[in-house]
Amino acid sequence: MTTKPKLGLIAGNGKFPFLVLDAARAQGFDVVVAAIKEETFPEIEAQGAAAVYWLSLGELSRLIETFQREGVTRAVMAGQVKHKQIFSSIRPDWRLAKLLISLGTRNTDSLLGAVAKVLGDEGITLESSTSLLEPLLAKPGVLTKRAPREQEKKNVAYGREVARHLAQYDIGQTVVIAEAACVAVEAMEGTDAAIVRAGEIMASLDAEASTLSRALTVVKIAKPNQDMRFDVPVIGVKTIETMRQAGASCLALDAEKCLLLDGPAIVIAADAADIAILVD
């Protein structure tokens, strides 16, 4: 009997881990899921994984021991772990506590990069989180029926400039722009919350006194030298719905660096909301 290759899946929240699990199984892997108690959707139990283990966010030693016991030497990290969880809910074990003390900064790249190194030292290679989902990476071009209008193009150009400066410091991947003015910047709260906040700010302005257009442009970028093993930009239909409610009319993404989690359904939702999507 031929033994299937094993793949470890460190699962955060959202749809991303489910897509990775399905793709890995379709390619012949037995998938061993390390589900994060504070984040992973419970439905992961019913998705056909070879095994599902529930671990708390701070249990790095148990994660390593679980994968080693299962014979996992390759792993993928997929799904969001809310940044604020790292500061509020985490109870680090001795190994993670030691790692945290050693960090100069506690942003996503430094923390997850250090975790990846510890895993590697223990014989577990962390691989690109998009390697099994290449068809879902955003391809260059205008994805929607409507192309960005001139003001939206100006917003995109300015937003990319602002976002790339911020991304150098691993602050966030999204900025929200109105008439070349930065309305909101993503930090620990996440993309959708930043978009909601931008909509609330615009709604609070005096319509007669304000010189800003109410139409918002959302720019979501990859970091410089984006590590595709973790914290890859993702959007879904929920992002489009959040934009619609906030009064955003355009979304700009980086080509081949952002996952479209719901595939064509995202474009259908954007067309229905008269939202332009530009990828370059």
Image (spheres, helix red, strand yellow):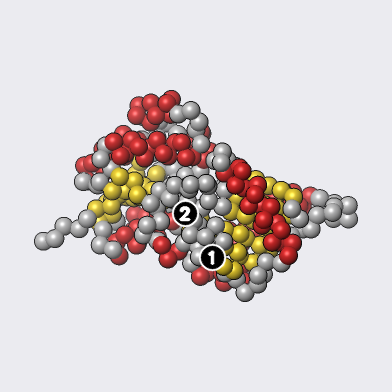
What residue lies at 24% left-to-right and 53% top-to-bottom?
6
Query: Which structural element holds mark 1?
Result: loop
Image coordinates of residue 280 in percent, x first then y, are 57, 61
Point out the frontmost of discs 2 and 1. 1
Q: Which residue is mark 2?
A: 14
Image coordinates of residue 64 in percent, x first then y, are 29, 38
Decide which of 267, 41 is in the foreground and name it.
267
Decide which of 124, 261 is in the foreground and name it.
124
Decide which of 138, 84 is in the foreground and name it.
138
What residue lies at 43% left-to-right and 50% top-to-bottom?
228
Q: Can the viewer see residue 212?
A: yes
Circle 1 crowding by C-alpha within 10 Å: few under 14, some 14–19, many from 20: few
Decide which of 116, 53 is in the foreground and name it.
116
Q: Amino acid at mark 2?
A: Gly
What residue lies at 48% left-to-right and 67% top-to-bottom?
263
Query: Which structural element holds mark 2?
Result: loop
State the separation of the CA atoms marked 2 and 1. 25 Å
Residue 172 in the figure: left or right of residue 17: right
Above or below, 279 relative to 62: below
The quadrant the N terminus occupies is bottom left
Q: Amino acid at mark 1?
A: Pro
Residue projecting furthest to the left: 1
Specify the quadrant of the image occupied by residue 125: top left
Circle 2 crowding by C-alpha within 10 Å: few under 14, some 14–19, many from 20: some
Q: Which comes before the other along the chain, label 2 or label 1?
A: 2
- State how many labels appear: 2
Q: Which residue is mark 1?
A: 140
What residue lies at 28% left-to-right and 43% top-to-bottom?
124
Residue 35 in the figure: left or right of residue 245: left
Above or below, 59 relative to 160: above
Residue 166 in the figure: left or right of residue 202: left
